[in-house]
Amino acid sequence: MTRSKYIMLGGGMVAGYAAKELASHGLGPGELRIISADDTLPYERPPLSKGFLLGKDTEEGILINKPEWYEKQGIDLKLQTIIDEIDLTKKRLHADSGEVFEYETLLIATGARARKLDCPGNDLPNVFYLRSLGDSRKIRERAKNSKQAVVIGGGFIGMEVASVLSQKNIETSLIIREDRVWSRVFTPAMSEFFERYYLSRGVKLLKNESVASLQGKDRLDVSLSSGRKIACDMVVAGVGATAVTDLFAKSGLAIENGIVVNEYLETNQAGIFAAGDVANYVDKIFDKRRRVEHWDNAVSQGQHWAGVIRGERRPFLHVPYFFSDVFDLSYELWGDSQGATQTIARGDLSSSSFSIWWLKQDRLIATFVMNRPDEERQFAPEWTKSRRTISVDRLKDQNRSIQEAI
């Protein structure tokens, strides 16, 4: 049995950035152990559906820290290590190899797993789900010899993967259950813009459709709920993810859509924290609970945890943030548009330069920015966090600087 002051269970972005933050403030040799089921060092996740999938990024290039960095910092990194039993009373983690790891403080960062399609054939060869580097490797390899592809899901994963496959000159069909792309986030006008953009680049959009079944091996037949059938070489499904909490089901930890933590990322058991995709945390800015599966949240919570255990006991106050790259477009999103009473557009939605501002009772709650002045990117998160009152008329006025909306 080996003992560590800190153990991070999960080797994703939370671990990579939390380790970096701890090390920057001084970390004794052997104080930190990272236990990961993955076969790769902690790496950046966004490139998996963007640059890495496209072939622009290398595996080494997306690592958060180089291999020698962990050795230099005295961090014990256990890869391909499966924890199959936990004893939170004795503060021990048992691996399937027989190894036992004891800790003083535990950070749970087990992330989320891709949700599978709910239909026959959902695990056939050449049906892919994208969550890990290994998944992205497989999709990239299959794409080399594919002429037709079907992407299922009209959210950001589906949109990004469809963009990449289309850029590889693969005839790509995007299956969307709803009546427009990313309807949960985009306004109808935004969806219309992106749909036009995808169609102009050869992506076929099939809306109000779902997959009834998948058949085949090397070539696949995709049967849709409408009765339509599509033949293709590969299928990639982006239909959501679920938090990885199975190990803790009977542990006594509070679990509800992830592991429940407070505003300090603490669970209901002393000395145990959770962060990243697996954490259902208290969002003090929006006065609600949320579980976020985006890069920025994992980075920020990992860094915040490192501060909390060093004695910087302050609540996690962070405006949710997301960015995406599709074709030659890059955009950013801040906040949470749920409950918005008004939406204001700046720029031109017929072009690729516009921003959308969601307000609730004259306060900014969410912003979308694409190819706009830097000041819009600057003020969007700042105004959301401060809950300042916004002048709707000034925000609408395209001739006014964005600063004049306060």
Image: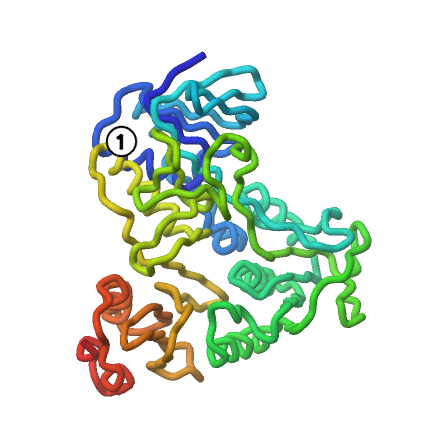
Colour scheme used in the picture?
A: rainbow
User: Residue 260's quadrant in the figure?
Assistant: top left
Mark 1: which secondary structure? helix
Q: Quadrant of the C terminus?
A: bottom left
User: Residue 305's quadrant in the figure?
Assistant: top left
* Left or right, 223 with reference to 58: right
User: Residue 393's quadrant in the figure?
Assistant: bottom left
The residue positioned 65% from the left and 63% from the top of the image is 170
Q: Quadrant of the N terminus?
A: top left
Q: Which sits in the foreground, 336 or 203?
A: 336
The location of residue 163, given as percent across then percent down, is 55, 64
Say whether residue 402 is visible: yes
The residue positioned 59% from the left and 45% from the top of the image is 135
Say whether residue 61 is visible: no
Q: Is residue 138 above or below residue 15?
A: below
The location of residue 275, given as percent across then percent down, is 39, 42
Q: Is residue 77 above or below residue 262?
A: above
The location of residue 228, given as percent across then percent down, is 79, 71
Q: Which sits in the foreground, 16 or 255?
A: 255
Amino acid carrying mark 1 in the image: Ala
* Left or right, 29 with reference to 10: left
- How many discs mark residues in the rendered view? 1
* Left or right, 336 with reference to 20: right
The residue positioned 64% from the left and 68% from the top of the image is 177
Q: Which residue is mark 1?
A: 23
